[in-house]
Image: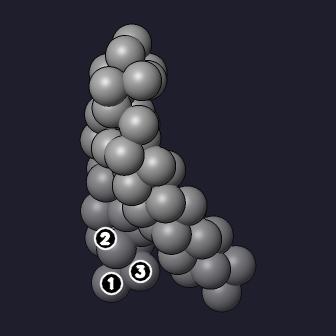
Amino acid sequence: MVNSELEMLKQEIDALREQIYAYMEYPEIFRDELLESSSKIDILINKYMALTSK
């Protein structure tokens, strides 16, 4: 269970990283999207770290 959840979180983090890299090409246009994606990735990374510390 934990391993599958960790894998799902990792995939979501990777997808968000790709989005952030795309948005960074035009940060002035995608400012809100960058902020939202950064917030989401922070939450997911914290969840991932919490699961790995158990």
Q: In the rendering, at what x and y percent does residue 29 appear?
A: 32, 25
Q: Are marks 1 and 2 in contact (CB under 8 Å)?
A: yes
Where residue 2 is drawn, which disc sits there? Answer: 3
Spatial distance from mark 2 to mark 3, Cα to Cα? 5 Å
Which residue is located at x 29 percent, y 62 percent?
8
Placement of 44 over or under 12, stated as above or below: below
Spatial distance from mark 3 to mark 1, Cα to Cα? 4 Å
* Label 3, residues with CA under 10 Å away: few <14, some 14-19, many ≥20: few
User: Three-letter amino acid code at disc 1?
Assistant: Met
Spatial distance from mark 1 to mark 2, Cα to Cα? 5 Å
Q: Classify residue 20 by image quadrant.
A: top left
The residue wearing badge 2 is: 4
The residue wearing badge 1 is: 1
Placement of 11 over or under 25, stated as above or below: below
User: Three-letter amino acid code at disc 3?
Assistant: Val
Placement of 15 over or under 37, stated as above or below: above
Q: Are marks 3 and 1 in contact (CB under 8 Å)?
A: yes
- Name the image quarter holding the C terminus: bottom right
Residue closest to the eye, 39 or 11: 39
